[in-house]
Amino acid sequence: MKLSTHVLDTALGRPAAGLRIVLTRLSDGVVIADVLTNQDGRVDQPLLVADAAQPGPYEIVFHVGDYFRRTGAATSEPPFLDQVPVRFGAAENAHYHIPLLVSPYAYSTYRGS
């Protein structure tokens, strides 16, 4: 099992560099990854690899409020979107790719390839 992600800032039309992402295994509360996106809006290493992978529920939290504050985006205080949690189930030994398309007031995600 492998998990990767990337984040696109749809308001600016570019990758979201320096955005914090935290991955937690919900069955036991273990934080598996706490990373920042690179200049391409991606993480340098997979968030989850076979050694730490177990079937079950996970949560990936994208810290978009901090990212938009740092980039100077026009947002309210507190921001409309601060943290975007995505809860998903990993039921099979497969590659999971969870991208995030985000602006200060909307987001979209899906299981990519």
Image (tube, helix red, strand yellow):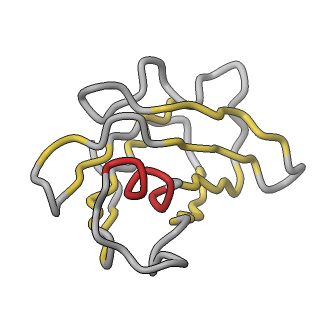
Q: Quadrant of residue 108?
A: bottom left
Instruction: Tell me if 57 is positioned left or right of 97 in this view.
Output: right
Foreground residue, 26 or 61?
61
> Where 94 sits versus 60, above or below?
above
Residue at point 53%, 63% (across, down): 86
Foreground residue, 40 or 75?
75
Residue at point 14%, 44% (across, down): 14
Instruction: Tell me if 39 is positioned left or right of 62 in this view.
Output: left
Residue 112, x across and y down, in percent: 29, 49
Residue 106, x across and y down, in percent: 30, 76
Q: Quadrant of residue 5?
A: top left
Residue at point 26%, 59% (across, down): 101
Which residue is most to the right?
Answer: 28
> Where 101 sits versus 25, above or below?
below
> What is the count of numbered marks?
0
Residue 71, x across and y down, in percent: 32, 49
Residue at point 16%, 63% (across, down): 11
> Where 22 sits versus 1, above or below?
below
